[in-house]
Image (cartoon, grey):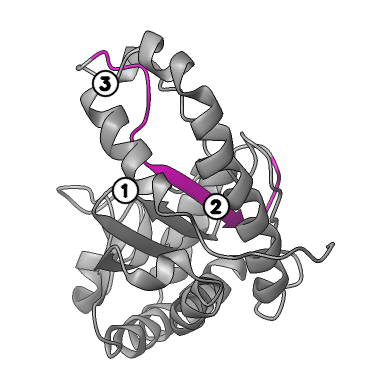
Amino acid sequence: MEKIQFNGFPKQILRFFSQLTQNNNREWFLAHKEEYETYVLKPSRAFIITMGNKLKKISKKIHAIPRVNKSIFRIHRDTRFHKSGCPYNTNLGILFWEGPEKRRIWYPGFYFHLEKRILVLCTGVYEFSSLLLKKYREKLSCSAGYRELQKILAKISENNHIIIEGKRLKKNPTGYAIPEENKLLMKYKGLRAMYTVKTPEILHKPELADFCFEKYSQMAPLHRWMVRL
């Protein structure tokens, strides 16, 4: 992957998302599209290349593709799935994933989420694909698989401000032998380690990449476990 200088995200990116939140309509966005290109997309591409190079130390198969609909999530919403009808997302979403290029959100990866007030870093899968969900449940249906994941999650949780979360079923899935102590983990439909912080000053500095890599490294055992499923 080519080398490129990442100098941090400009402070104007937070102002852009704050104003977009207040003016979430096509007319305003088109009038400020140049700001979106300059303050959001351009530094995002540099960050993806820089961060991608670092994440290769965790896995050489990580995808870090500095394009919209690849590592960069679209700013345009599908209004069919948003009751508010607002046409734009008011955050920056970036994903570094390991798996097929299509359906990237169904596979293990490292996620970067920026809003006007918070920065969120995640590792894991937001929602398992049907195949990965099947493998996940099969792995946890034996005590050894459960204990391995439990140990990984416990170790990750020792790091300050990193929590384990994910979508869960109300009841355990049928058709699996579930050890009594494993009933909670078996309910997950997606599983992530997540670090959340108020937008730090380091966001605007080149050292942001090192900051993110440190957090991702602390959560990486979960990524590796999922890749092995």
Q: Tell me the number on the disc at residue 115.
A: 1
Amino acid carrying label 1: it is Glu
Labels 3 & 1 near each other (Cβ < 8 A): no
Q: Are marks 3 and 2 in contact (CB under 8 Å)?
A: no
- The answer to whether residue 98 shows anywhere in this view is no
| Residue 92 against residue 229 in the figure, above or below | above
Nearer the observer, disc 3 or disc 1? Answer: 3
User: Quarter of the image containing the N terminus?
Assistant: bottom right
At mark 3, the secondary structure is loop
Give the CA distance from mark 3 to mark 2.
26 Å
Q: What element carries label 2?
A: strand
Viewer-side residue, 85 vs 189:
85
Residue 152 lies, in percent from the top left, at 40, 84
Numbered tag placed on residue 95 in the rendering = 2
Q: Earlier in the sequence, mark 3 or mark 1?
A: 3
Q: Look at mark 3 in the image and give the residue it sits on.
A: 23
How far apart are the two marked residues, 3 and 1, measured between alpha carbons? 15 Å
Which of the two discs, 2 and 1, labels the residue nearer the N terminus? 2
Asked if residue 114 can be seen in this view, the reply is yes
- Tag 3: amino acid: Asn
Residue drawn at (39%, 9%) of the image: 27
